[in-house]
Every structure is written in C-alpha cells, then in structure tokens.
Amino acid sequence: MGKYFGTDGFRGEANKDLNFEHAVKIGRFLGWYYGARQGKKAKIVIGKDTRRSSYMFEYALCTGLMASGADAYIMHVTTTPSVAYIARVDDFDCGIMISASHNPFYDNGIKLLNGNGEKMDEETILMVEDYIDGKMEVPIAEREAIGRTVDYVSGRNRYIGHLISMSKYSFKDVKVGLDVANGAAWSIAKAVFDALGAKTYVMNDAPDGYNINTDCGSTHIEHLQKFVVENGLDVGFAYDGDADRCLCVDEKGNVVTGDHTLYIYGLYMKERGKLLNNKVVTTVMSNFGLYKALDKVGIEYDKTKVGDKYVYENMVETGNRLGGEQSGHTIFLKYETTGDGILTSLKLMEVMLAKQKPMSELAAPVVFYPQVLKNVRVKSKPAAQNDPDVQAAVKKVADELGNTGRILVRESGTEPVIRVMVEADTKELCEKYVDSVIEVITAKGHLA
C-alpha cells in the first residue's frame, strides 16, 4: 500500500482526507501518463456511485484529465464492476470509479483500473502519489490537444446487456428481493432481473446523496431478511454502495455469505467438470465451516490475504476460476476481472434453477463456526499490530484455542482500524477472546 492508496483505492472523508485537489491531480497524471507521454490522446472512462461528493470528484477528475489532453468518458452513476468491464471491452486506456464502497456517505474514494479492468499496478499508483506530492511535473495540454468529456451512458447499457446474457435460465415466476443500498446498483439490478422475467421486489432504491449504505444493503442484511420472509420471496440479494459485493438471503430468511457462495457455485462447477484445478480461492477470513464443507465434497482451496485484489492475483497466477471473500466479493474469472455483486446474484440464481432446489438447501452443508469480529479504531495500525503486549495477548488466545478455533488480528486496508476476529465453539468464547485482545490494545493507549 502507498501513502494515499490502500488495497481498494484512495479513500477517506470527502474534502478532508480526500479532496477535490487530489482528484484534479489524479486526473492530470493519468491523462498525461496514458496520453501525451505516449504521443497520443488518452481515452479514460469514469463511473461514480450516488454519494453527493461523487459529483464533485467526477468533475474534478474530468478537469484534470482534459487539462492533460485526455478525453473523459462519463458513465454517470454505475457500479465498479461495470467500469472494469467497459474499460476492458471498449478498449479504454484505464478506468476510474468514484466510490467508498460500503462506507458512509461522507466518505468517498477513487479506484483506478487498468485497460484490462484490473486494479491498477503498484508502480503506476506510486507515480500517481509522487505527482500528488509534487515530486514530479506533468505538462499541460494546449490548443487542439486539450481534452473533452463524452457522455457514455451507452457503456452502462452495454454492461446491463452483458449481465442479462450471463443467465442460462428464465427467472419467470421467481420472486426475488433486491436491496440496492441506495447506491450504484439502484438503476441496474432491477432492470436486469426484470428483463430475465423475475417478479422483482426492490428496497432502498431512492438515493438522495446521503442515504447510501445507511441502515441498508449488505452491511445491514437484517432488513432484507425481514423483507424476504414478510413478502414470501424465494430469495433475496443485497449489494453494497458500488455493487461489487453481494450477500444473499434464502427463502427462510437466513443469510448466505460469500463463503456459502464459494461452496454452492464451486460444487456446481465441480459437478459439471468446470472447476479447473479442483480448487477455489478463499481469504484468511473464511470460516472453518466452509473448509469442512469443501473437504467433504473433495474441493481444494487456497488462502490469500484479505482483499479481492489478492484473490484475483492468485487466480491469474494459478488459473483458478472461482474465488472470493466472506463479505461477498466473488470473482468469476471466466466472465470478469473483479467482484461483481449483480453477477454473483445471477450465478446463485443459476444454481437454484439448474438444481431446482431452494437456496436454504444449497447452503445447508456449510455450517459456520461462531465468529466475532470487532473493529478497533487506532492511531497507528502498525504500532498497535506490532506491540509486543498485543502480540502476546494474541498468542495466548491462539494457544488456548488450539485446534478448536482460531484468532486473526489484521490491519484494515482502507480504514485506520485493527480488526480482531475469533472463531470458537461458542459465541461467548469468541466474545471473551476478542475482548481480551482489545483490552490490551486499549490499555497500551493505541485507541484513536
């Protein structure tokens, strides 16, 4: 990770940690780097979520891009995976998504994608940061070299068509609930499910710039659980603010996580001879219950650091075709280069319809160990993580758990937060062990 960019872009409170001047400079650098530096005019596509500040950052980025001679193609409100898809299939030099994903409305972020729809490489990110810090100069465009903006809502429509084409089955008469989190999926998800014939029931689809992720979406799945049961729906799907993740709710109101998705679709691929390497890619946050279920059906697994970036890197390196995170980022490498919440929901629908089984039955073999995860806001993530007393507390928990559970303490890649997670036989034990570590972090004065 760099000075400004974490595992999922440059993220922070709008006009405090991330301001419009940062956005102008990012645009200035990218417009030159992909354009004038190579003796051509750069072509760069931009999308945004529904945060009020996204408009400001969109225009700031466009200003910087045009000043460096690039043409900025604006997709307006759209999802992160749509920008990744369009950057790849429509031959853009790179893509930019303005979003802070699942964060509250007052935060925002700038995610950079290369022309293949992949997260930007570290070398280029470091050059962007050097330019932000004034360590290098970028020439300004003049006369006919100055860039322009292009309305590119057609790119979003092309992406909707791509999603519709992903379904092998009609959704006719299937009652589907969608929680679009007042975010980027609000104008896309329903259109896709309606086109496929579903009886679609939508909630949290009235974005006002301030209500994105507020008590809704994948971070507040309890509302969709209630919605599915009260309306007698067959299944429900909840997205986050930029719709790169998806959690599911079965017909009984139970949550189906990203770990369940890896099991359900991994087994479906294995049964059809499509699971290359007989392996799925997980992260260290995946539950013991997933691994037990995969072992039972003879599916192997890799474990990466937390972050869909690392999952994707593993998949590219090994040829594994399915991977993701418990939080709902799932990558289907045959179709896309990043987590895509709407695609995930379509793939889960495919398994339901192919096997003619309810979601509850498909997910049942994955029996989760109780897990407690608490976030601790700290002054310095490395200082808290590497404190000898904190490490000793973590080791003590690990020794006491032995083979009956595990503890994981890690730094957030996007926030000033240490995450403390324990899995054990009971939730009470999880709470006890998590709190014992947090008490040490607090006592040593690391809290922000």
Image (cartoon, rainbow, N blue to C red):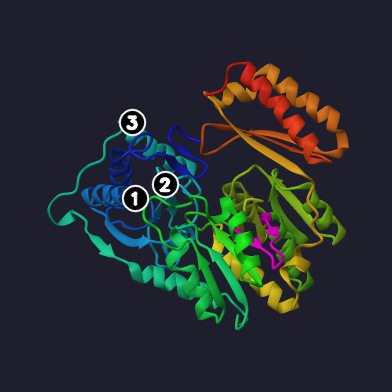
- In the image shown, does 124 or 395 lie closer to the viewer? 395
User: Distance from label 3 to label 1 (Cα)?
Assistant: 26 Å
The answer to whether residue 334 is seen in the rendering is no
Q: Residues within 10 Å of mark 1 (few under 14, many from 20)?
A: some
Q: Which residues are magenta?
A: 246-258
Count neighbours of disc 3 (C-alpha within 10 A) and say few if under 14, some if 14 to 19, many if 20 or more.
few
Sequence-earlier tag: 1 or 2: 1
In the rendered image, the residue lying farthest to the left is: 143
- Residue linked to disc 3: 133
* CA distance for labels 2 and 3: 27 Å
| Mark number displayed over residue 105 | 2
Q: How many marks?
A: 3
Q: Could you tell me how far apart the alpha carbons at marks 1 and 2 are, in whole angstroms?
A: 8 Å
Q: Which residue is pictured at 47% across the width and 34% down the height?
A: 2
Q: Secondary structure at mark 2?
A: loop
- 414 or 250, which is in the foreground? 250
Return the x and y of residue 91 as percentages of the image width and height: 39, 65
Residue at image mark 1? 52
**Along the horizontal axis of the image, is 152 left or right of 379?**
left
